[in-house]
Amino acid sequence: MFDCPGCGRRIEDPSKGWCSGCGVHLRWKPQGGLSSNDKVWLFFGNIFLSPLLGVILYFVWKDEKAQKASDVCSVTILAFVGTLLLVFVLALFGSN
């Protein structure tokens, strides 16, 4: 189900090809995007796995490449804080 782009009426069966309210031609295509559950897993995976990778790289490089390890640590912390701020702003103002 979706709304008609012409009149806004709820279309129950888009396979007819036209809106019964205003007669506009419908170009409906089924979409095979990610499900809501997949989006949630990707979101939380990015929030928690990216910092984990940063911590692992820090410990791998801390003795041999101290500057690179420090940079990775800084970027990881900034990315994590930025993500948390983004989540807070989206929760505060709401998004669809």
Image (cartoon, grey):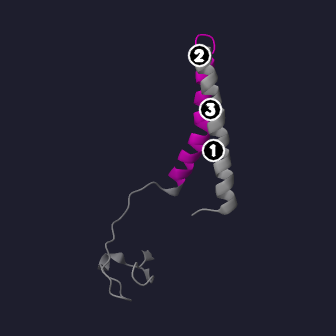
Q: Could you tell me how far apart the alpha carbons at marks 2 and 1 are, in whole angstroms? A: 25 Å
Residue topped by disc 1: 83
Q: How many marks?
A: 3
Give coordinates of residue 87: x percent, y percent.
65, 51
First reached walking from the N terminus: tag 3 or tag 2: 2
In the rendered structure, find residue 61 and report the number of the disc placed on it: 2
Tag 3 near tag 2, CB within 8 Å: no
In the rendered structure, find residue 76 and report the number of the disc placed on it: 3
Q: Main secondary structure of the magenta part?
A: helix
Q: Is residue 60 visible?
A: no
Q: Amino acid at mark 3?
A: Thr
Name the residue rendered at 52%, 57% in the picture: 36
Name the residue rendered at 31%, 75% in the picture: 15
Neighbor class of circle 3 (other Cα within 10 Å; few <14, some 14-19, many 20+) is some
First reached walking from the N terminus: tag 2 or tag 1: 2
Q: Which residues are magenta?
A: 37-65
Neighbor class of circle 1 (other Cα within 10 Å; few <14, some 14-19, many 20+) is some
Magenta stretch containing residue 42, yes or no? yes
